[in-house]
Amino acid sequence: MIKFTELNLNPKVLKAVEEAGYETPTPIQAGAIPPALEGRDVLGIAQTGTGKTAGFTLPMLSLLARGRARARMPRSLVLCPTRELAAQVAENFDTYSKYLKLTRALLIGGVSFKEQEAIIDKGVDVLIATPGRLLDHFERGKLILSDVKIMVVDEADRMLDMGFIPDIERIFGLTPFTRQTLFFSATMAPEIERITNTFLQAPARIEVARQATASETIDQLVVMFRPSRRERADSEKRALLRALIDREGDKCSNAIIFCNRKSDVDIVAKSLKKYGYDAAAIHGDLVQSQRTRTLDAFRSGELRFLVASDVAARGLDIPAVSHIFNFDVPGHAEDYVHRIGRTGRAGREGRAITICGPRDDKALDAVEALIQKQIPRMDNPLGDAPAPAKDATETSEKPRSSRSRSRRRSDKPKEPAAKADTVTESVEAKTPEAEATEVAAPVAETVTETVAESEKAPELVPEKARGGRGRRGGGGGKSDVVGLGDHLPRFIALSFEERRAG
């Protein structure tokens, strides 16, 4: 088996690696480091937790050991999808460059622009950044990328999921064509394949595991969840999560609980706290200082349960995570691989338990199709909840809705409306100037009869029974007056000849 001493690394870098306690490289490191040291482009594909970060950090430091950076012109660039991953890469550089006189800068959101600009102005050998903040500095005129000799894209498939691909393509265009490019990803979507074909020159392809596979050291299980009633689904699901944690007992030393939505992250974390579990939330809407404190507490063991969105699913190196709980089946099957990859790292055993709700069946099928195996089912520790009675609420609501509709229909004065329509239609349809003379007499008779009826109405019907125009009828039946009401304009009562003469 090959050792780090056989990889031709810079002696000072090798010394730092040995002090960190590493002797044997992982397969992705052993495959990527030699071609990277030769100056070739590298396309690395490996499942999460296999040491991809050191796979590009160590050769970069060895290549950058000689030379000096100029102000605002970094010599190398590392792009990461999230702040946490960028911060972790920066820590790796600090660990392995301790005996080298190299500078590095971290450009991420949530930190003052002025502080970052002050570091860039001094000149940095290694620039680690998220795409958005990098472009912000470039557009401000504070950064020049024409001297970048080595460019790294880490977790490229996550970049695709987060919509960073247009930014990545723009950044590629700002760097020299002669740069060396190291491209690392856990999966290879067609869009990423297109980018590698466009921007990488005859890369050395290192694929140490089948795409989108999970470590064999992870015990994967699924719990099928069916709520007793729809309105109780959320609370019963949180109760199931607590029951699963209790069932694992002391084996669950710590765990990351993944939710699909940020709102659920906060709710689940607060629920666990309420029932006495040591939990905290982390997602993209929190300020960077709070996210950093929460991660540090989880890494140090002060925090037992980390409730997270997919911001923590990629690239974060937290070595001793005993359990992963998927509160929701992820919408993208690839995210399942990255989530459970937070446990079972570096040969350790891990356990991943997924709760599959009524609407998650298709997502679970997609996950099993991706990993090419069926995930074993485990018993629900709360027992099988009774299925909600179908149409129970609809059966009780239908009679009420039909009665209310019948009452609304009975409130409408049908006969007066029909009578008013008759008057209006008779007048409008039979009194145009182009009407023949023989029709005038029937029209005048019809109008006269209608006026006579309207003049008698006030004498026959009491004031309260007459529903005036715009009022709701009071159940008076034929005596209600609608439309023009008691008043009829004089011109309507005129005969055809009288109107024509006038």
Image (cartoon, grey):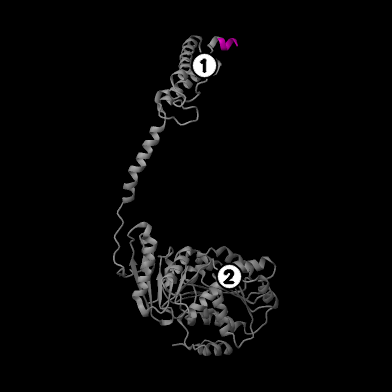
> How many neighbours does mark 1 have within 10 angstroms: few (below 14), some (14-19), or many (20 or more)?
some
Residue 385 position (above or below residue 351): above
Callout 1: helix, strand or loop?
loop
User: Which of the two labelled residues, at mark 1 and mark 2, occupies the earlier sequence position?
Assistant: 2
Task: Identify which residue is drawn at 63% across, 70% down.
Answer: 175
Q: Is residue 65 visible?
A: yes
The residue that disc 2 covers is 130
Q: Residues within 10 Å of mark 2 (few under 14, many from 20)?
A: many
Image coordinates for residue 121, horizontal then vertical, percent:
70, 75
- Image position of 34 (left or right of 477): right
Q: Is residue 301 left or right of residue 381?
A: right
- How far is disc 1 from disc 2 in space, using C-alphas? 78 Å
Q: Residue at x 42, y 74 (%)?
A: 277
Q: Amino acid at mark 2?
A: Thr
Residue 408: which quarter of the image? top left
Count of labels shown? Answer: 2
- Chief secondary structure of the magenta portion: helix
Query: Can residue 40 be seen at all in this image of the molecule?
Result: no
Quick one: quadrant of the N terminus? bottom left
Q: Could you say where residue 42 lies in the image, as x and y percent from the top left?
A: 53, 75
Q: Quadrant of the C terminus?
A: top right
The residue indicated by pointer 1 is 431
Question: What numbered label is drawn on residue 440?
Answer: none
The quarter holding residue 250 reads: bottom left
Q: CB under 8 Å between callouts 1 and 2? A: no
Work out whether residue 245 or residue 345 is closer to the camera in this orientation and state it.
245
| Position in image of residue 301 (x %, y %) | 47, 81
Mark 2 element type: loop
Q: Please give left or right for residue 236 compared with residue 96 in the image.
A: left
Residues drawn in magenta: 498-502
Q: Amino acid at mark 1?
A: Thr
